[in-house]
């Protein structure tokens, strides 16, 4: 066994332990498994929702962007900080409704507000289509990093199986509390390791962060530091693309199903609001991540693909094997604490918003819990298959999914803020938005101006939503009253 | 929660500050900050500007949160 693997194994051992323990504190009910009996405080929410965002992208894709596209990567800094803000208002409302009506997912609220099972199933279907490729990328990242840490002794399929085997065990065993307790540990590990390397690597190669940026600014790559940076081909990016990528990501941010549904696991309104207030402190964590990518610009030109810039440096920079192991453990943390949240959410959404409405009758508590667990295993197996056995390019699928997920934003606003919105209107808007988004994603040459395809989708979405809603009958006044009573704050 | 289904004024103020900061983080607001020097703590100004925008939002949220909590406690002693 290599030295590099030791920190990874220690880390996975702690994760397993911390994931198993909290089962003792949660009830053996659906509410316990899915939402930790609605008991999450600010700290747990902060890390669970931080985890929802900082996936293996944090240590692989993030530095890769900085390395290959320079200032274009700064958009990552902005969107998380702004994207969380709608949650200050939407989160507490969703929580109160969830508590009152017994809901746990985003699609349940939307389906109830518009009195439409079809809408609920549609939103759930979108959720799962977006979540499975996301999970696949996490599994791929883990397999890759463990194979690097073991000098190839551990093939990617085996590393991925080991790490996600552990994740599956504690998610099945402890549900939401397992996901949240491990998130705290993984989040702290990830942030500490990120800052450590973000400061250490420039110090080692250039004598500090300042001298490193000076060296880039006075060298042939100075253009990288000036926003909006470079596009994927290395030419300079346009402001259209940069600005619209931020807007779409901001709007899509809290629409992710594994994100939004945590509002219904929160203990009270205060803990959600305080979490939103504190969230920018986590976003600043992206600064060292970007620095890691910039470190390689002059030292290691021509790393391909750019996403492997951190693993490449770990292998070729002559670092102590302990440090390499530590960075690998940080990457595992980043991947696993997103992966567990996605698995848990996908299983829950699949059962509560897919299977139950289709059956047309409620399941018993025990039955529903069992079914959610089965579905978690099935979806993880599917994602695992795609991660190790299939060669379909999922990165492009995931890139498209942000534009798709952002189409849920008008639905959420209509749910809470526009009484006149109807199921047909919202459903038609959603389908129009997703269709337009897909069209421009697949055929970018059709775009009139190089805006993010999600923007075109949103314009179509809102126009259709408003027009069709006004032409159809709204739901009953009693139902609207429930939503009005949830407050306007 | 305010009466008559309207958001309190400070929430609209918060929304205004957030939109301004967002406008400063994208074109054309970001043109003001999109340059390399001066460096702050070794970071190019283009990064410092964005972190500054996030800082403004952080302070605005913090003040809104404090006011919200004070109001809640005022209603339910």
Image (tube, coloured by chain):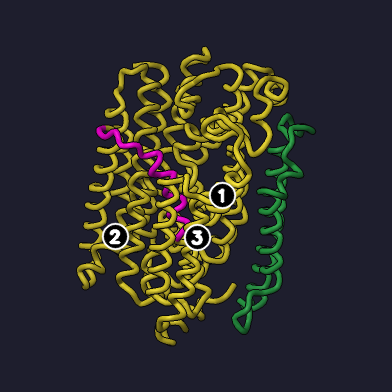
Chain colours: A yellow, B green
Q: Position of residue A267 (x, y in %)?
A: 48, 63
Label 2: chain letter: A
First along the sequence among labels 2 and 1: 2
Q: CA distance from mark 2 to mark 3?
A: 41 Å
Q: Quadrant of the C terminus of chain A?
A: bottom right
Outermost residue to the bottom = A477
Circle 2 — which element?
loop
The residue carrying pointer 2 sits among few (fewer than 14), some (14 to 19) or many (20 or more) residues within 10 Å by Cα, namely some
Q: Position of residue A373 (x, y in %)?
A: 25, 53
First along the sequence among labels 2 and 3: 2
Magenta residues (range): A389-407
Proximity of marks 2 and 1: CB atoms separated by less than 8 Å: no
Front position among marks 2 and 1: 1
Query: In front: A470, or A267?
Result: A470
Residue A489 visible from this viewpoint: yes
Reply yes or no: does residue A398 show up in magenta.
yes
Proximity of marks 2 and 3: CB atoms separated by less than 8 Å: no
Label 1: chain letter: A
Say left or right for A158 vs A219: left
Say which residue label 1 marks: A449
Say which residue label 3 marks: A458
Circle 3 — which element?
helix
Q: Quadrant of the N terminus of chain A?
A: top left
Q: Which residue occupies 39% across, 60% down?
A: A35
The residue carrying pointer 1 sits among few (fewer than 14), some (14 to 19) or many (20 or more) residues within 10 Å by Cα, namely few
Say which residue label 2 marks: A28
Front position among marks 2 and 3: 3
Query: In front: A209, or A104?
Result: A209
B29 shown above or below B16: above
């Amino acid at each position: 066994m290599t030295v590099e693997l030791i920190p990874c194994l220690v880390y996975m051992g702690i994760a397993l332990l911390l994931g198993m323990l909290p089962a003792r504190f949660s009830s053996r009910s659906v509410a316990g498994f899915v939402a930790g009996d609605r008991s999450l405080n600010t700290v747990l929410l902060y890390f669970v929702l931080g985890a929802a965002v900082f996936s293996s992208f944090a240590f692989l894709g993030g530095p890769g962007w900085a390395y290959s596209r320079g200032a274009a990567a700064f958009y990552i800094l902005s969107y998380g900080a702004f994207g969380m803000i709608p949650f200050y208002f939407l989160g507490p409302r969703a929580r109160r409704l969830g508590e009152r009506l017994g809901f746990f997912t985003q699609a349940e609220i939307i389906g109830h507000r518009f009195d439409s099972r079809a809408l609920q199933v549609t939103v759930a279907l979108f959720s799962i289509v977006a979540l499975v490729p996301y999970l696949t990328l996490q599994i791929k990242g883990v397999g890759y990093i463990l194979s690097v840490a073991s000098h190839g002794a551990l093939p990617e399929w085996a590393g991925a199986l080991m790490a996600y085997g552990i994740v599956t065990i504690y998610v099945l065993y402890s549900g939401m509390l397992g996901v949240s307790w491990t998130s705290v540990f993984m989040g702290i590990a990830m942030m500490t390791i990120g800052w450590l390397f973000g400061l250490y690597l420039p110090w080692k190669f250039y004598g500090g962060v300042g001298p490193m940026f000076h060296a880039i600014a006075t060298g042939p790559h100075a253009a990288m530091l000036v926003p909006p940076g470079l596009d994927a081909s290395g030419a300079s990016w346009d402001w259209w693309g940069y600005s619209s990528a931020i807007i779409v990501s901001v709007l899509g941010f809290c629409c992710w199903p594994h994100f939004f549904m945590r509002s219904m696991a929160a203990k009270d309104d205060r803990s959600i609001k305080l979490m939103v207030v504190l969230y920018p402190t986590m976003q600043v964590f992206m600064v060292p991540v970007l620095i890691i990518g910039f470190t390689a610009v002059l030292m290691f030109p021509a790393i391909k693909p750019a996403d492997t810039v951190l693993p490449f440096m770990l292998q070729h920079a002559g670092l102590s094997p302990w440090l390499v192991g530590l960075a690998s453990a940080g990457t595992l943390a980043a991947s696993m604490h997103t992966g567990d949240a996605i698995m848990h959410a996908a299983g829950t959404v699949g059962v509560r918003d897919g299977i139950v409405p289709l059956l047309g009758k409620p399941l018993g508590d025990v039955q529903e819990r069992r079914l959610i667990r089965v579905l978690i295993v099935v979806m993880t197996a599917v994602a695992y298959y795609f991660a190790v056995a299939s060669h379909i390019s999922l990165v492009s699928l995931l890139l498209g999914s942000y534009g798709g997920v952002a189409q849920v934003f008008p639905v959420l606003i209509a749910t809470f803020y526009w009484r006149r919105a109807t199921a047909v209107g919202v459903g038609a808007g959603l389908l129009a938005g997703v269709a337009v988004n897909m069209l421009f994603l697949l055929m970018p040459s059709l775009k009139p101006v190089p805006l993010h395809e999600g923007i075109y989708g949103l314009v179509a979405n809102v126009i259709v939503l408003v027009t069709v809603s006004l032409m159809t009958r709204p739901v009953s006044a009693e139902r609207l009253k429930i939503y009005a009573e949830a407050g306007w704050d | 929660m305010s009466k008559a289904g309207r958001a309190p004024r400070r929430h609209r103020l918060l929304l205004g500050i957030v939109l301004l900061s967002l406008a400063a983080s994208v074109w054309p607001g970001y043109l003001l900050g999109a340059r390399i020097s001066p460096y702050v703590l070794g970071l190019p100004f283009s990064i410092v500007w964005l972190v500054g925008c996030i800082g403004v939002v952080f302070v605005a949220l913090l003040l809104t949160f404090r006011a919200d909590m004070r109001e809640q406690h005022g209603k339910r002693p």
